[in-house]
Amino acid sequence: MKHYDYVLVGSGLFAGTFAWHAVKAGKSCLVIEKREHMGGNIYCEDVEKIHVHKYGAHIFHTSNRKVWDFVNSLAEFNRYTNSPIANYHGEIYNMPFNMNTFSKMWGISTPAEAKAIIEEQRGTITHEPRNLEEQAISLVGKDIYEKLIRGYTQKQWGRSCKELPAFIIKRLPVRYTYDNNYFNDRYQGIPMGGYNVIIDRLFEGCDVLLNTDFNEDREKYKSMGDYMIYTGTVDSYFDYCYGNLEYRSLKFESVLLDTDNYQGVAVVNYTDAETPYTRIIEHKHFEFGTSPSTVITKEYPVTWQPGMEPYYPVNDEKNQEIFARYEALAKTEKNVSFGGRLAEYKYYDMDKVIESAFGLVEKLLGADRI
Ligand code: FDA
């Protein structure tokens, strides 16, 4: 059996960024992936030449020049700028909250008018916010909370905003300019040809075992290399000895429609409590697609249960305490590094995952490799 310098468990961005640098440094890599495809959650499915973001909408954005240069060395990026729309019972608002939103909500036109209304509405909360509702009102006032935050957040977390802790929304993006760009980052876009172009480049030169769950024979897979990079869930690695870490999960319902343009924008958030889904994604708009048909995906938040896809970690006190115990255990493992969103039980944007993998490259392959 071939012996490798590195065994990588998982084939997402974290493992891929490390693999790319390792192969360049002349190291051999074996990738073990339990799904039937590579790429982790950035993987796209090709439906009638439309790149469908199978695990949720992915928009690349960063202010880190090194990360931007790296991803651009793998694929060319288009000029996509995320400007989602909020639909509240058929009323359309621009996101993030900006002068277009305020103008539509209150019929006003100047930043001073908007500031005065928000200031007056947030004035009702004079104490330290005790829950998410109070936190949101203290940040953006009552009207925006009622129409654009309350229903959406309740669907997202499966609990009333009064029962959710204030820390979930430390800040909310409020802009007193007519700027619908969702992100503040310097660079933004979608890889031309879809994310699979990046995935293919990242793992060039690696051997790959698909449909292979590392947990089914850990010792065997571990012994196939000198060193292992593990990007699966940290609790499963340790047989859930301190219990399950909790997540929020998502259900995606995709449909191919015989129309060239369903909603005129890639992302529409449904912010009322009654619509059961939180968003509809129309994938072709990420790439300015011109095909005669379209694919839309409705996104439903669901309560996670063991066996479901883990999407959003529930970083509350209880889960953070459990994670701290797993983290301490992970530090005692010899010749293994744990990285990425599942092993670190952390919500990570793509650029931050790449940044974190750069750190591991520096540690294991040398600072001159970045
Ligand atoms: P990732 O989950 O991609 O990869 C881990 C891999 O390990 C998976 O392929 C999994 O199958 C495999 N694996 C796990 N256990 C295994 C085992 N036991 N054996 C073998 N294989 C195993 N970020 C951003 O910048 N912009 C955005 O718009 C979005 N949008 C977004 C939407 C949604 C719904 C979510 C949940 C997340 C985002 N993100 C995002 C974040 C983005 O998805 C994230 O940064 C990366 O996918 C993380 O890459 P990783 O390599 O850490 O994990």
Image (cartoon, rainbow, N blue to C red):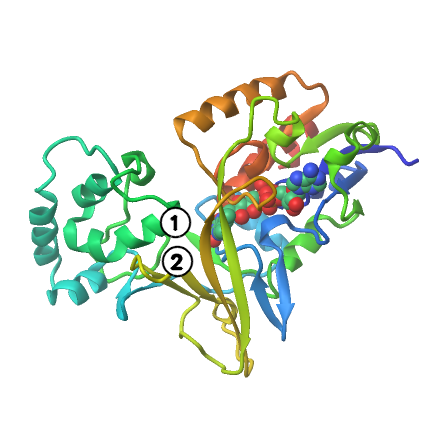
Q: Is residue 157 above or below residue 282?
A: above
Callout 2: 10 Å neighbours few (<14), some, many (20+)? Answer: many
Q: Which residue is mark 1?
A: 156
Total label count? 2
Left or right: residue 109 versus residue 184 is left
Residue at image location 50% in from the left, 40% down from the top: 352
Tag 2: amino acid: Thr
Q: Is residue 269 above or below residue 324?
A: below
Tag 1: amino acid: Gln
Identify the image quadrant of residue 123: top left
Could you tell me residue 213's position as x and y percent? 74, 40
- Quarter containing ligand 1? top right
Residue at image location 17% in from the left, 41% down from the top: 138
Identify the image quadrant of residue 278: bottom left
Left or right: residue 253 versus residue 332 is left
Q: Are marks 1 and 2 in contact (CB under 8 Å)?
A: yes
Could you tell me residue 148's position as x and y percent? 26, 56
Indicate which disc residue 278 carries.
2
Q: Is residue 296 visible?
A: yes
Left or right: residue 129 versus residue 222 is left
| Quadrant where the image shows the C terminus | top right
- Which mark sits nearer the N-terminus, 1 or 2? 1
